[in-house]
């Protein structure tokens, strides 16, 4: 038996003819582009919680380093759930995944709405451990938002990129999302 799970998965995909990219496309929940643009009016990088980054090994959550608060994935999780559902309360079995590698350690991108996606818990690890899936998520973020980290080159459409109809459409902002954006200061409150 092979002691490397990534190799076992790669061999099983090949042997069974399974392509995980359409599966992930069909259940990847991105925020609506208009939500990202609303947040971007407050912060040019589109971070829901600017000034936070993921902590590294040996760092403690809640500590401030050079004016940046260290986080696990809590703030990114809250950000994407509020951007999609208007709240993080009651949203179950989704994991928040960063689209671009290592950007969670950069306060410009840790809670950037275009850089985070919700994936069902059962497939969330594919965003980090399957390079084909990861490349497709990066291109999808580019396609939806025209966004990439400042230091990165624009992604190319990867081989095996799922057809447009395979992707779950970003849900249109609900009244709860509008309210979350108002609380954030990204929208002016509606007149009564």
Image (cartoon, grey):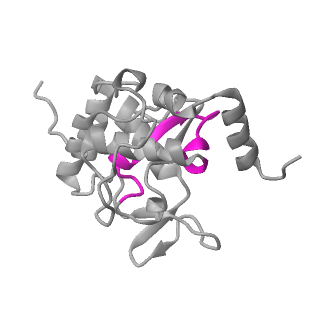
Q: In the visual, does 155 lie left or right of 131?
A: left
Q: Position of residue 187 (x, y in %)?
A: 18, 40
Q: Is residue 183 visible?
A: no
Q: Is residue 14 visible?
A: yes
Magenta-colored stretch includes residue 114: yes
Residue found 40% across the figure and 47% down from its top: 138
Name the image quarter holding the C terminus. top left
Q: Position of residue 65 (x, y in %)?
A: 46, 76
- In this view, the residue farthest toward the top is 165
Q: In the visual, does 112 lie left or right of 95?
A: left
Q: Which residues are magenta?
A: 109-129
Residue nearest the viewer, comparing 15 with 121: 15
Residue found 41% across the figure and 66% down from its top: 106
Residue found 34% across the figure and 35% down from its top: 31
Report the number of discs: 0
Looking at the image, residue 160 lies above or below residue 60: above
Q: Position of residue 41 (x, y in %)?
A: 17, 50
Q: Quadrant of residue 84?
A: top left
Q: In the visual, does 146 lie left or right of 81?
A: left
Residue found 64% across the figure and 33% down from its top: 122
Q: Position of residue 136 (x, y in %)?
A: 43, 41
Residue nearest the viewer, comparing 142 with 132: 132
């Amino acid at each position: 038996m092979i002691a490397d799970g990534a190799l076992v998965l790669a061999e099983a995909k090949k042997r069974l003819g399974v392509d995980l990219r359409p599966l992930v496309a069909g259940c990847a929940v991105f925020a609506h582009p208009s939500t990202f643009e609303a947040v971007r009016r407050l912060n040019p990088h589109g971070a829901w919680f600017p000034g936070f980054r993921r902590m590294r090994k040996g760092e403690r959550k809640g500590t401030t380093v050079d004016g940046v608060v260290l986080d696990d994935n809590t703030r990114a999780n809250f950000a994407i759930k509020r951007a999609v559902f208007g709240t993080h309360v009651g949203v179950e079995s989704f994991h928040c995944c960063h689209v671009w590698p290592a950007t969670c350690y950069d306060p410009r991108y840790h809670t950037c709405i275009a850089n985070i996606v919700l994936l069902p818990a059962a497939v969330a690890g594919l965003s980090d451990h399957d390079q084909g899936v990861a490349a497709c998520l990066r291109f999808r973020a580019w396609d939806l938002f025209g966004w990439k980290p400042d230091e990165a080159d624009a992604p190319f459409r990867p081989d095996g990129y799922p057809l447009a109809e395979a992707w779950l459409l970003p849900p249109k902002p609900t009244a709860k999302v509008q309210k979350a954006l108002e609380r954030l200061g990204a929208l002016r409150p509606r007149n009564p």
